[in-house]
Each structure stands twice: as structure tokens, then as C-alpha cells.
Image (tube, rainbow, N blue to C red):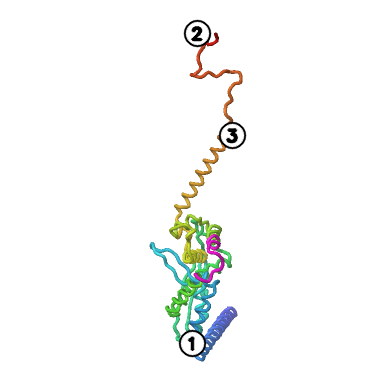
Amino acid sequence: MNQLQNQYQQSNENTGVTAHSTASREMEEVKGQIFMARQFPRNVFQSEQRILDNCKRPALAQVAVYSYPRGGTKVEGPSIRLAEVLAQNWGNLAFGVKELEQRPGESVAMAYAWDLETNVRQEKVFTVPHSRKAKGSIKKLDDPRDIYELVANNGARRLRACILGIIPGDIVDKAVEECNETMRGGNKGPIKDRIAKSLQLFKEKYGVTQEQIEERIGYNSDAFTEYDLTELGKIFTSLKDGMSKADDWFSTEVKKKQESKLTEAFKEDKTKDTKKDEKPQEKPKNEDVKTDDEPSIDDPEQRELLFEEIK
């Protein structure tokens, strides 16, 4: 009995030593980061210029802004990709997502952003159930990889909010405007080809038809402009990041009407093909067909007139 108590007490002591050592190491790392930030403070103007230079890259500009509908209006803002570029180029900023605890059926995580110079910190602790809603039903997740991706996905949205809470708002607005300018003026190739490619991507990825997109924009796709393509790019980014669904943007009634028209057209074509296959009834070869204009020989008056003509 005493031996078991000694082993248990020794185990607790080892655990306490390990935890204390880990906490001390993390504290020293934080102190080192703060010291380096104070030794090499950021130059605000250089940081702003680095951010704007990155926003001139078309690959970043395409995924920099998301948008989604809410209450009859459109909500848009910088995506997590742009928020990461802002944090990287602002300098002396620690940010990330940590999983604090994994319980049966759920995980507790924290997203944070910490300005090491000003000691301003934003953090959000949240719980992620190990389940995913698909096709109207809730599916529980058991695969560790699926759980990790789910936590990371949910953490990205909180991380974006933390970063945007640290970096000044005017810098964020300038970055968004620069990305929009890049999208408007930095495109290569004819606009018609890019419109066709955009319509094809929406059809292949999310089943959105051209008619639905035209109903959303308000006019025919032949009249789309660079601004309209930019708006479609934001919607595509929102769908790709899981911020919204296709039904939030595009009318399902238009798709139903289109499907019903296709069904009616198919029925009409089938009816025409059936009529073509039906052969017309042939008249008997040896049967004389009598019309109302031809004279009848059985009538006495007509018979006398016929004899007089013969004479």
C-alpha cells in the first residue's frame, strides 16, 4: 500500500515538474519576443507600403475579399488570406490558433493576435462540436484529420477577427481598395473569355447556372463589366471559404423555371418524333374516289346531258 502511494506521489511530482518546466520555457520565449520587438520597432510607413505592394499581386487580390448577403444587404470584408498578409507585413505581431482541450465530442480552442510592441492582445476562446451538417443531417466526426480540419476552419474566422482588431482600420481599408484596384486593372485576356470561364466555374463547382447569375447581377452576361467580375470573384471566394451557400446568393426559382422549360421542350421534341414515326394511311389503288363536284350518272338529268355531249 505504501509503495503504491509513493509511486502515485512521485508521478504527481514528475508531472508538476514537467508542467512547470514547460511554463517557464514558454515565458522565456515570450520575454524574448517582447525584447526583440522593443529593440527593433516597426516603421509604420514601411509596413503600410509592404502591405500595399503585396495587394498588387493578382493571386492575392482574387482571394482577398469575401462577401455574403444579410438582411437584404451585402456584407463584405477582408478574407483570412488578406488578414494573414496584413499581420505578416505589419511586423512584431504574434498570432495563431491553439487547441486548448479535446473533450469527447468537442474541442476547445483559442484564436489570438498579440501586438508585441504595444502589448495589445485580442483573443477568442470557442468550442467546436465534432460534427458536420450535410444534406439536412448531422454527421459525427471520428477521424482525427477531419476533427483537425474542422477546428482549423472554425479558428480561421476567429483569427481574422483578432488580427483586424489589432491592425488600424485605415490600413485595412487601403489594403482592400488596393486589391479591388488590382482586380479591375490587372487582368489579362479578353473580358468575354474571363466571363465565360467564371460562368463555367460556378456551374462546375456549385451548380449555379448562367440564368441565376444574370438574375443576380441584373442584366445579360454580355454586358458584364470588370466590376461585375470582381463581385462574382468575391462571391466565389465566400462560397469557397464556407462563409455562405449558393442559395444565399442565387435564386432557386430561376433554376426551377429553367428545369421546367427544359422538361417541356423535351416533351415537345418527343411528341414531334412520335408523329414523324406514324405512317399516313394509304388510299386503295382500285377504288374510285368520288367528290361532291363530280356529276352522278344515276341522276336522269345528268345522264341526258351526258348523252347530248357524246352526240
Q: 282 above or below 304?
A: below
- Amino acid type at circle 3 is Asp
**What kind of element bears circle 2?**
helix
> Considering depth in this image, is 293 or 199 the residue closer to the camera?
293
Going 56% across and 64% down the picture, which residue do you hit? 142
Give the magenta part as a residue range. 184-196
Q: 66 above or below 305?
A: below
**What kind of element bears circle 3?**
helix
> Considering depth in this image, is 225 or 153 the residue closer to the camera?
225
- Amino acid type at circle 2 is Glu
- Amino acid type at circle 1 is Asn
Residue, disc 1:
43
Residue, disc 2:
304
Count of labels shown? 3
| Picture coordinates of residue 236, whole percent (x, y) | 51, 64
On the question of residue 93 being in view, the answer is no
Residue, disc 3:
277
What's the CA distance linking mark 1 and mark 2? Answer: 126 Å
Locate residue 77: give its quadrant: bottom left
